[in-house]
Amino acid sequence: MIATDQYRVIQSIRQLATYAFLIVLSIVMAFPMLWMVLTSVKQQREVFTSFLPRQLDFSNFERVWHAMDLPNHLGNSLYVAGINVAIVLITATLAGYAFARFQFPGRDWIFYIFLAAMMIPGQAILIPMFQYLKSLDLLNTHVGLALSMTGGAISFATFLMRAFFRTLPFELGDAGKIDGCTEWGVFWYVYLPLARPGIATVLIFQFMGVWNEFMFSTTFLISPKLKTIQPALYQVIGRYSVDYTALSAGLLLAILPILVVFLLLQKQFIKGLTAGAFKG
């Protein structure tokens, strides 16, 4: 009886320690976001003098919206992300289905080559990509920027979609063929509707990656009007000073599209993340 009580005490202490650690970790992780939100409604002189704003000042959002021409840069980012996500989704869904369902010579080696593309850092291909886009007259264009970010993205998305398609029963495809479906019909009518969680996962990951991309956007887009949201926000950082209130307000506005996409697809996203946990 005493041993049982001691065990319960030990378990309670461990549980309390775990909760305390998670609470502290949550506070540490959420603090930068909280600081950014509070800074966006402060006056410039209050940024480092007080944690809470003495008076809420929403003029920073209006100032950033008009002075930086933020709607134009948000539209540029949406356009680039739309092109890139569409290409990656279509390509990765078809490739992932082929790698998961078909048997053909060299399938595994081709898939490993796809995976190898994920290991190439963007810095290594920055100059060659610059020269390549210039030779195609796609430098300083949104289409060129969108295409420049498809290589490694397609590899990662194909990896996810292959893992997801392999979790779906192969018997579904056989049943569809018995009912008269072609291979394309099996893919379109049987497997594609079931692949929505995987597609949502790829969409969120890719949209976030393109939306937050900075290096390629800064290098391949030269005209100020063509800049996407991240290089545009970087203009707030001066050589000798930083307008933290404007930067925080701009970052909050830039986060909103990502939040909207995630909230719309969160259920499918969670299903897609756990889909490959049971079958590799």
Image (tube, rainbow, N blue to C red):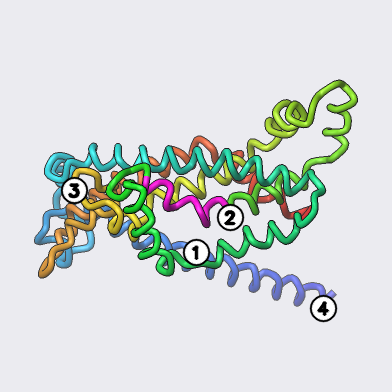
Q: Are marks 2 and 1 in contact (CB under 8 Å)?
A: no
Three-letter residue code for mark 2: Phe
Q: Which residue extends farthest right?
A: 178
Q: Residue at 13%, 63% (x, y): give it.
A: 238
Q: Earlier in the sequence, mark 2 or mark 4?
A: 4
Quadrant location of the C terminus? bottom right
Q: Which mark's residue is nearer the viewer, 2 or 1?
A: 2
Q: Which mark's residue is nearer the viewer, 2 or 4?
A: 2
Three-letter residue code for mark 3: Pro
- Residue located beneath label 2 in the image: 156
- Residue located beneath label 3 in the image: 224
**Distance from label 3 to label 4 (Cα)?**
72 Å
Q: Residue at 51%, 49% (x, y): give it.
A: 205
Q: Nearer the viewer, residue 149 or 203?
A: 149
- Residue located beneath label 1 in the image: 23
Say what secondary structure mark 4 lies in. Answer: helix
Q: Earlier in the sequence, mark 2 or mark 1?
A: 1
**Distance from label 2 to label 1 (Cα)?**
33 Å
Q: Earlier in the sequence, mark 2 or mark 3?
A: 2
Q: Residue at 73%, 26% (x, y): give it.
A: 189
The residue stretch that appears in magenta: 144-155
Three-letter residue code for mark 1: Ile
